[in-house]
Image: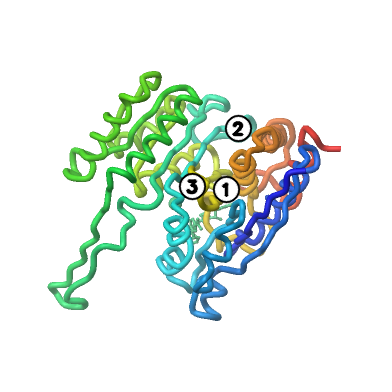
Amino acid sequence: MSSHRIALIPGDGIGQEVIPAACAVLDAVAIGHGLSFTYDEFDWSCDRYLQTGAMMPADGLDQVRHHDAILLGAVGYPGVPDHVSLWGLLIPMRREFQQYVNLRPIKVFEGVPSPLRSARAGEVDLVVVRENVEGEYSEIGGRMYRGTPQEAAVQESVFTRAGVTRLLDYGFDLATKRRGQLTSATKSNGIVHTMPFWDELVRERAARYPSVAWNQEHIDALAAKFVLSPERFDVVVASNLFGDILSDLAAAVAGSIGIAPAASLNPEREFPSTFEPVHGSAPDIAGKGVANPLGAIWSASMMLDHLGHPEAGADVLTAIAAVLAGSGVRTADLGGTADTAQFTEAVIAALPTAG
Ligand code: NAI
Ligand code: MG
């Protein structure tokens, strides 16, 4: 029996609804694979911020530092500015735990119509590898002459050789295990310092992976190609900002933001990695029990892979695909009438090792 201790941070809104769904699937798949999970739940959220003035306690990161992984719902809610919730929890966690790879797979499943007629099931299967701890999301900068006509704001981007190189190596290595293609998102025509540096490092690292066919695309053209021919992409490496935008776009192409998973990985495993759906707290549907738990369940499947149980992870993906392709059970965002609990039960029943 292999057992794991997982830190749960459901967070805000539908995070509270999709994380229990992911845990129910984890517990069900565990039975067939000789695994067991214990969960420690943390109430870090905008609610907590409103009551105590902080998204998490001062020693919060120390409380989860020794867990095997972190499963996170979503943080952010009306009433608390989004930069407060993001910089009060997610960004410190990504940085302190060196979760420098943000991995976002996208697939079009059989039975889930893409809004694009050209995107067919089985053909769209790509991964966005987003730099997660530096780049455009930096604390360097400031505001001057607030409230006056001369008011100015400056925000610096930070790209380091070490930070970009380790991210690119992760992407190239992943490409060798997939279809051997890598696309680098750039904008070196308009952004004349950091992006040519990024391009140079891509060329440098590519030389070490002769089996990977690679190219680079400017982010604007790349966004258009994600819409026009998403099937041509395999691994896409991108800076923090470009990767953030591109992966939401790709999730929409795949049918709904509700299905998209993500992992913030510390590949060296010195710290816990965080597994989190791409979507936010969805205040418009929170509390109704109708959120699509698929993004959270797929994130849990990625957690199983990371914890060394790829067969269990694959079983969860197989069950998701079987429910979508072989039954009408789906949540409202995918055009169905099932609620969160009904969809979760269908996934559990479809596990290859069930009953
Ligand atoms: P959102 O992802 O919460 O919602 C966008 C739209 O997609 C809404 O119409 C929502 O109902 C729908 N949606 C999202 N997830 C769904 C699901 N699982 N099932 C069905 N429908 C779903 O993005 P929004 O509205 O921009 O942000 C709301 C809050 O969430 C903000 O405070 C934002 O900062 C936060 N947020 C947090 C993230 C995180 O913790 N990783 C990521 C994105 C947003
Ligand atoms: Mg985003």
What residue is shown with label 2?
A: 109
Count of numbered marks: 3
Helix, strand or loop status at disc 2? loop
Please tell me which residue is depicted at 80% across the width and 42% down the height of the picture: 31
Residue at the far right in the pictured view: 355
Q: Position of residue 135 (x, y in %)?
A: 31, 50
Q: What's the residue type where badge 2 is placed? A: Phe
Q: Dot 3 corresponds to which residue?
A: 266
Point out residue 27 in the picture as x, y percentages from the top left corner. 76, 48
Mark 1 — residue? 258
Q: Is residue 152 left or right of residue 66?
A: left
Mark carried by residue 15: none
In percent of width and height, residue 350 lies at 77, 36
- Depth check: 312 or 295 in front? 312
Quadrant, the C terminus: top right
Instruction: Determine crowd level at label 2: few under 14, some 14-19, many 20+ residues with C-alpha closer than 10 A.
Output: many
Label 1 crowd bin: few (<14), some (14–19), many (20+), radius 10 Å? many
Q: Does the beta carbon at disc 1 come under 8 Å from ligand 1?
A: yes
Could you give the CA–CA distance between mark 2 and mark 3, rounded to whole angstroms? Answer: 28 Å
Q: What kind of element bears circle 1?
A: helix
